[in-house]
Image (cartoon, rainbow, N blue to C red):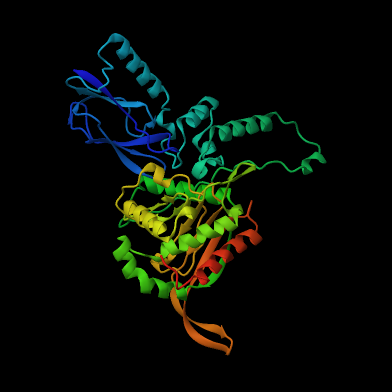
Amino acid sequence: MAKFELKLPKMGESVAEATITNWLKNVGDVIEADEAVLEIATDKVDSEVPSEVSGKLVEILFQVDDVVQVGQTIAIIEVSGEGNETPAAETPAAAAKIEKEVTTAKESVVPANFSDSDKFFSPLVKNIAKEEGISVAQLEAIAGSGKDGRVTKDDILNYISDQKNITKAPVAAPAAQAKVSTPQPIAAAKSAPVSVNGGDEIIEMDRMRKLIAGYMVASIQTSAHVQSFIEVDVTNIVKWRDKVKGAFEKREGEKLTFTPIMMEAVAKALKDFPGMNISVDGDHIIKRKNINLGMAAALPNGNLIVPVIKNADQLNLVGMAKAVNDLGGRAKAGKLKPDDTQGGTYTVTNVGTFGSVFGTPIISQPQVGILALGAIRKVPAVIETPEGDFIGIRQKMFLSHSYDHRVVDGALGGSFVKRVAEYLEAFDVNRDY
C-alpha cells in the first residue's frame, strides 16, 4: 500500500492560506477520486477540497479552525498499486519527513486563545502576539493596513515598538506637550449587556457574518467616510434596454440587466479619475494599474459577498454582462472560487435591488471608494428644450458615493460621481451592444 499526501491546493494568486471549517470524511473512510474530503474557508469564500486519488483516509493532520498554508499536507490517504501517488510513508526517511512536516505545521498553529475573536489573524501575527504578551483586545484594536483591514506583520511590530516607546518616554515639559503625536488605536468599548426575555430566540452568528461584522467595524475605524449624492436621468438607458434586451439574450445567451451598463460607466470614470483607483497602506498611497471592479452581491442566507470583475475597463458591454451574470450566478449558488473575491480596486453595490433610493455604503478596505446604485423610478421632472421648459415623466436614480476623506477630497469624490452620471446621461440610444 502506498501513501498519498493530500495537500491544500493553490486557490488563486492572492490566496496563501485557508481555515479548515469541517471534515467531511473521518479516519478509516473510503474515498473516491474527486470526492470532497473537507471544507475550507478563506476571507469570504467557502470551498471543498477533493481527493485526487481513490483510497482510505488513514490520518488527519489538522483540526477544525486550524489555519493551513497552501501546499501543506493536511491528510494522508492510503492507496493501492503504483502510480502518481506519493509513497511518503513507505521508507523510514520519508516517514521522518512527513512527521517533521506535521510537527512543523502543528507548531505553526497557535493555541485557540484567539478563537473568540471575530477578526481574522494570520498564524504569524498570532505567534508574535503570543510571544509579546499582546492580548486579544489589543490585537483587535490595531488598525490593519493589509487586505480588508487585516493586521500584517509590520502592523503588529510597529504597535509593539510604539508601546515600548510610550513606556520608556520621559515626562515631557509643558512646551513639548503641544507636539502632535501619532494617535494609538483605542480598544473598542465593551457592549452593554443585552437582556433576554423568555420568548426571545438566541442565534449565533455564522462564520461569514462574524467576518463581515469585523470588516465593517474596521473600515469605519480606519477611513474617514464622507458621501456625495447625485441624481441621474437614465431614461435613455431604460428605453434602450427595453428595446434590445430580447435580441441581446437571443444572440448572446445572456440576460441584459442594468448592472453591466452602470459598471461600464464606472470603469470609464475610473480611467478619467485614477485618483479613485487607489489603496492606502499606512502613510503611502498605492496607485492601482488595473481597474478591478468589486460587485457586492447578497447571498441567499442574507450574507454579503463581493466578487471582482478583473480588468473591467477592457470589457465591452457584452463582456461586462457575461462577467456580471457569471459572478452573480456563482455567488448565489455558492460556487465562487477564493480568487474571485480578491484584488478589487473599487466597489459598486446595487441598493436599488431592494427598493432603496440611495444609501451610504461602507468602503471595502483598503480601497478608498464605493458607489451605491439607487432604485430607478419614474418621477416628474423639468425638461429643458429650445421651445422652453416643461414637465415630463423621466426615469431617474440616485448615485451615492462614499469615499475616504483621508486621501480623497470633495473635489475628487464629487467630480468622479458626476462623471459617472455624465456617462449615463449621455448614453447613445443608437449604439450596438
On screen, 142 above or below 53? below
The quadrant holding residue 93 is: top left
Instruction: Indicate the position of residue 200 as horizontal and vertical percent values.
Output: 32, 56
**Foreground of the two, 40 or 111:** 40
Q: Is residue 263 left or right of residue 299?
A: right
Q: Is residue 18 left or right of residue 150?
A: left
Q: State the residue at coordinates (39%, 56%).
A: 324
Instruction: Indicate the position of residue 31 as horizontal and vertical percent values.
Output: 19, 31
On screen, 34 above or below 216? above
Residue, far top: 92
Instruction: Indicate the position of residue 281 as horizontal and vertical percent values.
Output: 59, 42
**Foreground of the two, 213 or 293:** 293
**Foreground of the two, 375 or 286:** 286
Q: State the residue at coordinates (52%, 27%).
A: 128
Q: Is residue 290 visible?
A: yes
Q: Is residue 155 left or right of residue 327?
A: right
Tell me the quadrant of the picture where the C terminus can be found: bottom left
Q: Is residue 302 visible?
A: no
Q: Is residue 121 left or right of residue 57?
A: right
